[in-house]
Amino acid sequence: MKKLIYLDNAATTKTAPQVVEAMIPYFTEHFGNPSSVYSLAAESRKAVTEARETIAKALGAATEEIYFTAGGSEADNWALKAAAESYSSKGKHIITTKIEHHAILHTCEWLEKKGFEVTYLNVDENGVVKLEELRRAVRPDTILISVMYANNEIGTLQPIREIGELARERGILFHTDAVQAFGHVPIQVEELHIDMLSASGHKLNGPKGIGFLYIRKGLKLRSLIHGGAQERKRRAGTENVPGIVGFGKAVERAFASMEERTSQERELRDYLIDRVLKEIPYTRLNGHRTSRLPNNANFSFQFIEGESLLIMLDMEGICGSSGSACTSGSLDPSHVLLAVGLPHEIAHGSLRLTLNEEITREDLDFVVEQLKRIVEHLRSMSPLYEDFMRRR
Ligand SMILES: *Cc1c(COP(=O)(O)O)cnc(C)c1O
């Protein structure tokens, strides 16, 4: 059997064995409901508290500022909808960017139908928000700025500190979708003036279906789900104890190894980028060359279809992505690649490869060899390429 080379860690990551191991007792002997009074329940309660402490510490936040949700999408929805509603007496204008995850963009579209006005900021050719444009977009009735920490497709990191300072100066709430960044780059919410932050377990070797929203103390934000008194009465429902425990373990693990792991990823990422750009003609790198997630590479190969490339890579045991997992299956080119200014036909020939700590240089050598072969093969069948070569 072929070795599987998994290069789609922006879509999801493998649950770490230590994470699974930590979770199992909370399905078996420690199955109690944290809200009950007997000592069996105290075990669950204690585990949830410990995970919350681990996560809060990682962000430089207080434990009571962490609210568990069923993932990143839920945290994004909560932050935007609740902030919009809770602060609507002050104004109805929201600022975000054109390159957000659909959990933000589709929530904004929904808010527009509810009477809110949304400004979608442009980004430059590297996918970075322009601070001058943000400054100009701020109005007296702006209540919320939501800008992602790092982009899930092209990996570009945003000037979060500057955005946080600007928002704080103007008295505007600042939310960041840090689902891709949390556990991969250091984040301190106080220093960066972040009011709300979304994260998700399965993007850092934790379980799926668990996430959190950080809500700065003192912020008046309505409850997401009404019911019991869980999560300080803001998000009702019996806690996903095994998920929370697994998330806590994943965070512990990710932060303990962050420096070493990400410097290794960065080195291999750059090795991959250098070889692909050097050895495959008519190729570009998408996203910022250096200010990007340590494990993200995103290329556009002219004259080919990303979908065909993915299928042929899969036949070699290589998992990649042509955009975000949410856009695959549709033929629309990625909204992120269009926002950085790529024409449709080039955006279509894109490939995202996202590394993890298990990937080796030998794996990448194999990937580059396969990419060279497949891209050449696909181009040999392209009338556009033939035409281009003839005219050259
Ligand atoms: C994966 C992702 C989400 C959604 O998180 P889920 O836990 O899968 O709901 C939101 N935003 C970004 C940037 C993501 O990468």
Image (cartoon, helix red, strand yellow):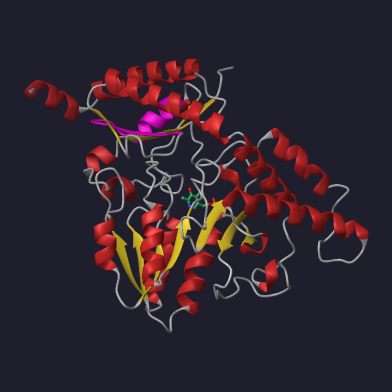
Q: Is residue 209 visible?
A: no
Determine the residue positioned at 31% across, 62% down.
Answer: 120
315 relative to 332, above or below: above
Identify which residue, 248 or 313, lies in the foreground: 248
In the displayed structure, would residue 50 be above or below residue 90? above
Front-most of 333 and 67? 67
Where is residue 206? Give x, y as percent.
64, 43
Q: Is residue 308 visible?
A: yes
* Marker count (numbered): 0
Q: Residue at x 44, y 16 (%)?
A: 366
Foreground pick, 106 / 19: 19
Instruction: Provide residue 18's location: percent of width, then percent of height.
Output: 72, 35
On whether residue 301 falls in the magenta region, the answer is: yes
250 vs 216, left or right, is: right
Task: Read off the magenta span.
Answer: 295-313
- Quadrant in which the N terminus appears: top right
Percent coordinates x, y for residue 328 in the rendering: 42, 44
The x and y percentages for residue 131 are: 28, 57
Residue placed farthest to the bottom in the image? 89
Whether residue 249 sits left or right of residue 88 in the image: it is right
Location of residue 234 (image quadrant): bottom right
Residue 365 versus residue 3: which sits nearer the camera?
365
- Say which residue appears at 66% left-offset and 75% top-offset: 226
